Image: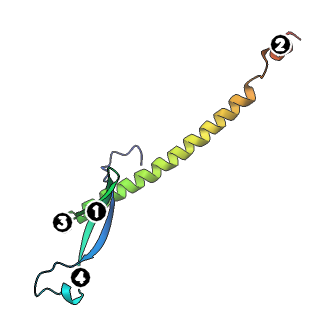
Amino acid sequence: MLLERSVLLKGTLIEVERTCGKPGCKCPRGEKHTCRQLSASVEGKTRTWNVPGRYLARVKRLTDNYRRFRRARAAWVRLNAQMLEAINEMEGARTVPDFRDECRREEG
């Protein structure tokens, strides 16, 4: 997923029930309107945008791409940490604490 060239959209698609306040509408009687919104953190603040029905499938696909990318990125970071730990262990096992001991061993 990291190497794919798919477009990413940061955020989560959520479903919200709202009231419109129009006289004669069903929402004052408790039957709220359902709408889809994109929720995302921008500069440390949560923002939401209404997503019109014609964009719903595309926004869902792009936010799914983002989620898959972030999971793949996290796996890559974990793998890098494991590799670094193994390399550090190899270095520690191969590094001599005192050069004089190593020189005497080569001479002897």
Q: Reading the chain from its start, which is encountered first: label 4 or label 1? A: 4
User: The residue tagged with tag 3: helix, strand or loop?
Assistant: helix
Q: Amino acid at mark 1?
A: Leu
Assess disc 1: are there few (<14), some (14-19) or many (≥20) residues with their C-alpha within 10 Å of its C-alpha: many
Q: Amino acid at mark 3?
A: Arg
Q: Reading the chain from its start, which is encountered first: label 4 or label 2? A: 4
Q: Nearer the viewer, mark 3 or mark 4?
A: 4
Q: Reading the chain from its start, which is encountered first: label 2 or label 3? A: 3
Q: Which residue is mark 2?
A: 106
Q: Which mark is residue 93?
A: none
The answer to which quarter of the image holds residue 61 is bottom left
- Specify whether 87 is left or right of 46: right
Q: Which residue is mark 4?
A: 32
Q: Which mark is residue 54?
A: 3
List x then y, in percent, for residue 68.
41, 55
Q: Amino acid at mark 4?
A: Lys
Name of the residue lying farthest toward the bottom: 29
Q: Give the Cα distance between marks 3 and 1.
A: 14 Å
Q: Which residue is mark 1?
A: 38
Residue appearing at x 72%, y 30% in the figure: 92
